[in-house]
Amino acid sequence: MSDIEPIFFRPAGDIRPTSFPGFSGGRPTMVTFNRLELNQILSVYGRHVTEGEWRDYAIDMLRDRAVFSVFRRTAEAPLYRIEKAPKFARRQGAYSVIAATGLILKRGHDLCRVLRVFDRRRLELIKA
């Protein structure tokens, strides 16, 4: 192995040979957010960071779903999780926003519409 040769990591327990990182036999071994989805999520995240509500995030790419977790502080549990689960794409929609309690706030087929749940919550807080 040379210094310029890349190192590819596989999920734990994946013993199948891979020809391309992240893929095995033509099927992806993990779900990821694409660039457009990340741009939409990060624009909402950036808005809330400038308001001082959110301070940190984490991205997890698992076999069955991709998760973008939002934190108020780094050491706490996530306030919200934005999940992409392709197995629900035909039924309820691949995207969902889940609160810290596990309550699904919004689920749908279009990420932009699902992320609007954060805009409504801000307006409700102003009314009160």
Image: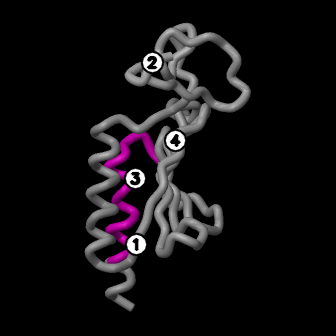
Rounded to the nearest whole Å, what is the CA distance between mark 1 and mark 2?
A: 42 Å
Residue at numbered disc 2? 2
Out of 92 and 46, give the one closest to the viewer. 46
In this rendering, position of residue 2 left or right of residue 35: right
Query: Residue 114: which disc?
Result: 3
Q: Kindly identify the amino acid type of the residue bearing the numbered disc 1.
A: Trp
Q: Amino acid at mark 3?
A: Val
Assign the magenta stretch its main secondary structure: helix
Image coords of residue 43 (percent x, y): 26, 57
* Mark 1 lies on residue: 54
Residue 28 x %, y %: 52, 21
Disc 4: which residue: 66
Q: What amino acid is found at the position of numbered circle 4 in the picture?
A: Ala
**Secondary structure under the numbered disc 1 in the rendered image:** loop
Who comes first in sequence, dot 1 or dot 3? 1
Dot 3 alpha-carbon crowd within 10 angstroms: few under 14, some 14 to 19, many 20 or more: some
In the image, residue 83 sits, relative to residue 23, either above or below, namely below
Q: Nearer the viewer, residue 32 or 92?
A: 32
Q: Give coordinates of residue 16: x percent, y percent.
A: 66, 13
Give the residue displayed 61% in from the left and 63% down from the top: 103
